[in-house]
Image (cartoon, rainbow, N blue to C red):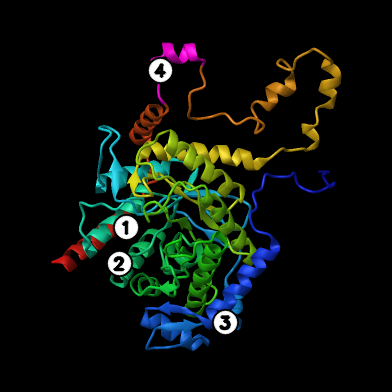
């Protein structure tokens, strides 16, 4: 393919939907939302949608969305905005051509790196995972990677969690709150850490992940929790998780269609509640395993569904958040490696703004800190694959060919010395690159052991950006108030 003068270098791109297919997804979405509708279980949400012009059946909770409401909601959502961070220089600019890695979320088990056994996750596991993510440059965003099973659900424990989060992590936070009762505590901590409500609204240091239920349900509990945050301009990533063959029809294109219906219905609620609030298109689609009825986490078809998420986001002009790190394996092994690699590369080559999934195994239920490092290595390799073949004027080395001529070599040329220090070569940070003899004489080191040693080194040395002393004192006061509230 000839390069047009003045155009940027080509990049590697993976595409699964034609323009006609994307048009059809949109048109069919409008028909389903207008005629079948969505069940909206939150009474507050139904009132908001009714006031915006949706047709609401209070008996069945079914809400039908006229096409003009959907189109206006798409128009209202900003297409470019930034997700801020406490750490200077770490704001993430959506729709700017960059891609960052987001932790996977909501696991409940941990692969203990000292014993190799599986066990329930603890608050200490969560702290270590959060500090490790803070240290890794590839990870630009936080999602609660595991729940601490040694902590009960209470306002006091939630406040302890959110204070510890900003103590252990300094980049952007994308996380839900779990009840509307948590909202005032969450907002008080935000205002304390970032200085004021105005600063939070301007900087967007946190975003909310909202997961409508498939098929076609906007739930009450988590949606009301989000609606309790109105007025703070908190960006929302809408993440339905349809399971093809179970909670979605047994067709990949119709699974894309269903998730699009759920995303756009939720978008209508969000924009009706707070017009102009930042919005991220973020469905995560998976497949049912016909042999068990459970999720088939390592299915290669997920790669195409993940790419389709990015393509539909771009169709509307929205920032894209998609998944890629998929495996049903419970430990880092050959199968988990090839399942993750085959899923993450196409997802990355669709080039979303945000790639979800680092750090969890076992259908996103089992924390592995070693896997988090491996996932960062995958991410760096995929970035290099997306870079493509750069053909700027300094890359055409015809003169070198003419100078060296037949039978020569380029090992000692200045251009080679310069290129191996550039992006022409990707130099692995993890992995065994020695000869067999050298590997054998070194005691046959294993990749996971190498990653484990790196985890220990990072946790022993990494210092999270400290909060100012007056902020720490105020957060301690909030925690005391939460303790008094518990009493």
Alpha carbon of mark 2 to alpha carbon of mark 3: how far? Answer: 34 Å
The residue singled out by tag 4 in the image is 444
Sequence order check, earlier mark of 3 and 4: 3
The residue singled out by tag 2 in the image is 185
Q: Which of pointers 4 and 2 indicates the residue nearer the eye?
A: 4
The residue singled out by tag 1 in the image is 162
Of the pair 449 and 337, the residue shown nearer to us: 337
Q: Residue furthest left?
A: 487
Q: Is residue 402 above or below residue 35?
A: above
| Callout 2 crowding tier (Cα within 10 Å): few <14, some 14–19, many ≥20 | many
Alpha carbon of mark 3 to alpha carbon of mark 4: how far? Answer: 62 Å
User: What element does badge 4 sit on?
Assistant: loop
Q: Is residue 444 above or below residue 320?
A: above
Residues shaded magenta:
435-446
Q: Which of pointers 2 and 3 indicates the residue nearer the eye?
A: 3
Sequence order check, earlier mark of 1 and 2: 1
Marks 1 and 2 close (CB-CB < 8 Å): yes
- Left or right of 394: which side holds 115? left
Alpha carbon of mark 4 to alpha carbon of mark 2: how far? Answer: 52 Å
- Left or right of 49: which side holds 456? left
Residue at the location (30% across, 68% down)? 182
Confirm whether the magenta stretch covers residue 61. Answer: no
Marks 2 and 3 close (CB-CB < 8 Å): no
The residue singled out by tag 3 in the image is 69
User: What element does badge 3 sit on?
Assistant: helix
């Amino acid at each position: 393919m000839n390069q047009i003068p003045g155009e940027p270098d080509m990049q590697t791109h993976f595409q699964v939907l034609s323009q006609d297919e994307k048009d059809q997804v949109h048109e069919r979405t409008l028909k389903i939302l207008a005629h079948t509708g969505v069940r909206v279980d939150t009474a507050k949400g139904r009132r908001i949608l009714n006031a915006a012009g949706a047709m609401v059946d209070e008996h069945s909770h079914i809400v039908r969305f006229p096409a003009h409401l959907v189109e206006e909601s798409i128009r209202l959502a900003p297409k470019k905005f930034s997700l801020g961070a406490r750490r200077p220089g770490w704001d993430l600019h959506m729709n700017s051509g960059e891609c960052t890695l987001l932790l996977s979320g909501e696991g409940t088990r941990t692969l203990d790196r000292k014993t190799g056994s599986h066990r329930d996750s603890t608050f200490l596991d969560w702290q270590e995972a959060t500090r490790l993510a803070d240290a890794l440059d590839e990870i630009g965003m936080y999602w609660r990677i595991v729940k601490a099973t040694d902590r009960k659900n209470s306002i006091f424990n939630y406040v302890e969690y959110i204070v510890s989060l900003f103590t252990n992590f300094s980049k952007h936070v994308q996380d839900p709150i779990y009840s509307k009762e948590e909202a005032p505590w969450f907002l008080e901590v935000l205002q304390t850490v970032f200085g004021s409500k105005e600063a939070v609204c301007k900087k967007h240091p946190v975003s909310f992940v909202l997961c409508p239920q498939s098929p076609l349900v906007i739930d009450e509990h988590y949606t009301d929790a989000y609606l309790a945050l109105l007025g703070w301009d908190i960006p929302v990533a809408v993440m339905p998780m349809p399971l093809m063959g179970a909670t979605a029809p047994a067709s990949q294109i119709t699974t894309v269609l269903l998730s699009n219906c759920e995303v756009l219905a939720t978008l209508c609620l969000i924009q009706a509640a707070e017009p102009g609030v930042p919005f991220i298109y973020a469905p995560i689609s998976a497949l049912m395993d016909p042999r068990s009825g459970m999720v088939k986490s390592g299915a290669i078809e997920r790669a195409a569904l993940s790419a389709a998420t990015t393509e539909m986001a771009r169709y509307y002009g929205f920032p894209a958040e998609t998944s890629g790190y998929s495996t049903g394996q419970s430990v880092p092994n050959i199968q988990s490696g090839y399942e993750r690699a085959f899923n993450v590369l196409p997802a990355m080559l669709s080039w979303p703004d945000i790639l979800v999934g680092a750090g969890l195994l076992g259908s996103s239920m089992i924390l592995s800190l070693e896997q988090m490092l491996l996932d960062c290595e995958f991410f760096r390799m995929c970035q290099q694959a997306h870079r493509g073949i750069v053909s700027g004027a300094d890359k055409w080395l015809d003169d070198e060919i003419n100078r060296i001529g037949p039978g020569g070599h380029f090992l000692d040329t200045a251009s080679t010395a310069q290129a191996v220090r550039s992006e022409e070569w990707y130099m692995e940070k993890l992995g065994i690159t020695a000869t067999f003899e050298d590997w054998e004489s070194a005691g046959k080191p294993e990749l996971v052991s190498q990653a484990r040693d790196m985890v220990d080194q990072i946790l022993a040395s990494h210092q999270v950006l400290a909060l100012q002393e007056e902020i720490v004192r105020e957060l301690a006061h909030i925690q005391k108030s939460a303790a008094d509230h518990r009493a």
